[in-house]
Image: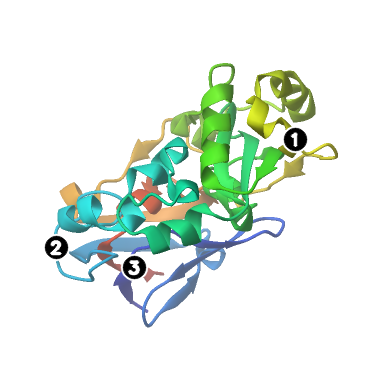
Amino acid sequence: MVYKGVLTKMQTEFLDPIQYYLVFESDFIHVNQLLNKTIDIKKVGEQCLSCGLDRPIFRQGFCKTCFFEKPLAGDWIMRPELSMAHLGKEDRDLDYEKKVQLQPHIVYLANSSNVKVGVTRKSQVPTRWIDQGAHEAIEIVEVPNRYLAGITEVALKEHVSDKTNWRNMLKNNIKDEDLLAWRSELKAYIPDEVKTYFIDNMSETHLHFPVEKYPQKPKSLNLNKDLVYTGKLVGIKGQYLIFDDDSVFNVRSNEGLVVEMTPY
């Protein structure tokens, strides 16, 4: 059977192991069921996730116009410390920004390739950790808006990384860390206006991914260059499909591509 649709990040279910789903307009794929099957992936077009038009994807699944104009791609998305909705100040669309920014946010530690600090909406826990391929994570503070989470992340990343090494994450080149100890050590660096939001009682969350074989030398697939790829699926971690020839396909970074997928 041929599945066709616009790529968006895989939806997930926090089970043991994590369950993954690709949702197209008229097709639905439980990706875990494709493990150990050969899959053809073919790029057949592009479609902006915002305007829905057949335009070249610029970044984050958006065409160039939407990336620079739509609120879904505002700078505060990647840099939460730039959020201004709590001040009633508009970036691109104040109503949208209030809806997203003025809700509970979590600052957390996650261990995917190394211990890193990050920010996510409370409603996105543990989805955010799954998407990053973290095998363990812990919350630090819960704040009422994105701005407070952003300034906390800025302060803490002076003392801990805010980046993930995707190759090490996919190779499973990681070690268990005492995130409670990390959290305790970093508490002193939380900004004064955020200290009261520190979560006192917290334990680590552990995540297990459906991977049967980790790549030794991960090589990223580029459908914009090669258009077609065929390989045996041997794992899913983060937002990556892992194939037996060490090729890996980042679904999230290919959002907006129209693809045909044929498992057999």
Mark 2: amino acid: Arg
Of tags 1 and 2, the one toward the viewer is: 1
Mark 3: amino acid: Met
* Quadrant of the rendered image containing residue 230: bottom left
**Whether residue 59 is situated above or below residue 3 in the rendered picture:** above
The residue at the point 43 percent across, 55 percent down is 232
- Estimate the x, y position of residue 146 in percent, counting from the top left: 53, 45
The residue at the point 56 percent across, 36 percent down is 118
**Label of residue 55 in the image:** 2
**Label of residue 261 in the image:** 3
- Estimate the x, y position of residue 70 in percent, counting from the top left: 27, 58
**Going from the N terminus, do you reach mark 1 or mark 2 first?**
2
Q: How far apart are marks 3 and 1 (CA)?
A: 49 Å
Mark 1: amino acid: Thr
Q: Is residue 120 left or right of residue 97?
A: right
* Residue bearing the label numbered 1: 196
| Image quarter in which the N terminus is found | bottom left
**Whether residue 174 is situated above or below residue 33 in the rendered picture:** above
Q: How far apart are marks 3 and 2 (CA)?
A: 21 Å
* Quadrant of the rendered image containing residue 83: top left
